[in-house]
Image: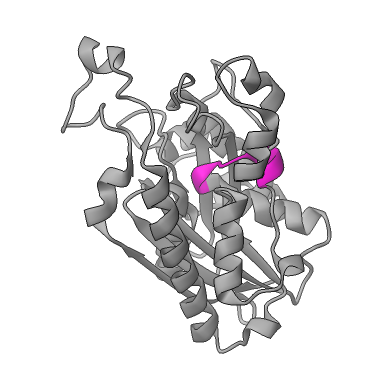
Amino acid sequence: MVTNVDLEQMVDTSDAWIKERTGIAQRHIADAETSTSTLGAEALRKACKQAGMEPDDLDLIVLATSTPDTMFPSTACWVQKRLGISGMPAFDVAAGCTGWLYALEVAVSLLGDKHRRIGVIGAEVMSKVVDWTDRSTCVLFGDGAGAAVIGPSERDVGLLASNWGADGNLAPILYQPAGGTRMPASAETVAARLHSVHMEGNAVFKHAVTAMAAAGRKAIADSGLSVEQIDLLIPHQANVRIMNACRERLHVPEYKMYSVVDRYGNMSAATIPVALHDAREEGRLVPGNVVAMAAFGTGLTWAGAVLRL
């Protein structure tokens, strides 16, 4: 665990500034041996146990991440290897912080006779793509993973409505410049720290709030429910200012917004599934409750969803 006080010893920042601007107090950082598939496999293992099944019973695995173990194969395949399973298709979805909602959208669309039990994972080790000398970004991110097992239901529960979208024209405001085919790895790219997060903070804030609120508003409207019928709002846990701006635009009372950003930081694709887990563990989500989710991410991508437990 790395606290803001720890970061004060590393870069020119302060605990008070980080809390005021982001709401983050601490974040969990993976050790050198831990990769994205390490965290993703453990999250999926726990989700399968809660569902009363074994990982080998899954018909499909969809994993959302921006920090894959390798460029190829997919991190979902590395998860299979870690779990000692095979046979079911496994692939990654790359949509940044929107990733888990994108993965959920894909998984739901594939539900049917061939795929009745689907593992949907959001997993990130952001600490390994962060420039720890850049005080504007290194304070924001943390590592983690969350997973769910989804399947068809004959009851009025599950995903009531969802939407997704992207605007590739905004790709340059949040990306990792080097490491792909546009700018292959070289001694020069490493020296220039081009393999870490590049973010234009003000532009991201502006577009994030607009996109995330619009996605959340559409999901609630499409669900046929009113805002008053939403029991909990879980926005992407980027920072409290973005989260509150989204909440206000959706006209959701402050007490209905659930946040874990103070203890985990921005875990990108893992934030929403981890928040869902923690909310349920704390009794904030119980059977019959309705939760609205909204996210934005690199791309620029966005998504919204409404779920009834």
Task: Assess whether residue 196 is covered by the magenta stretch.
Answer: no
Q: Residue at x 30, y 31 (%)?
A: 71
Q: Residue at x 55, y 16 (%)?
A: 33
Residue 245 visible in this rendered orientation of the protein = yes
Q: Quadrant of residue 184?
A: top left
Residue 89 visible in this rendered orientation of the protein = no
Q: Residue at x 24, y 55 (%)?
A: 168
Is 9 left, or right, of 161 in this rendering?
right
In the rendered view, tell whether residue 308 sits above or below residue 239. below
Which quadrant would the N terminus be assigned to in this image? top right
Identify which residue, 183 or 150, lies in the foreground.
Answer: 183
Which quadrant would the C terminus be assigned to in this image? bottom right
Identify which residue, 306 or 130, lies in the foreground.
Answer: 130
Q: How is the image coloured?
A: one colour
In the rendered view, tell whether residue 306 sits above or below residue 298. below
Q: Residue at x 56, y 51 (%)?
A: 57
In the rendered view, tell whether residue 194 sits above or below residue 145. above
Magenta stretch bounds: 261-269
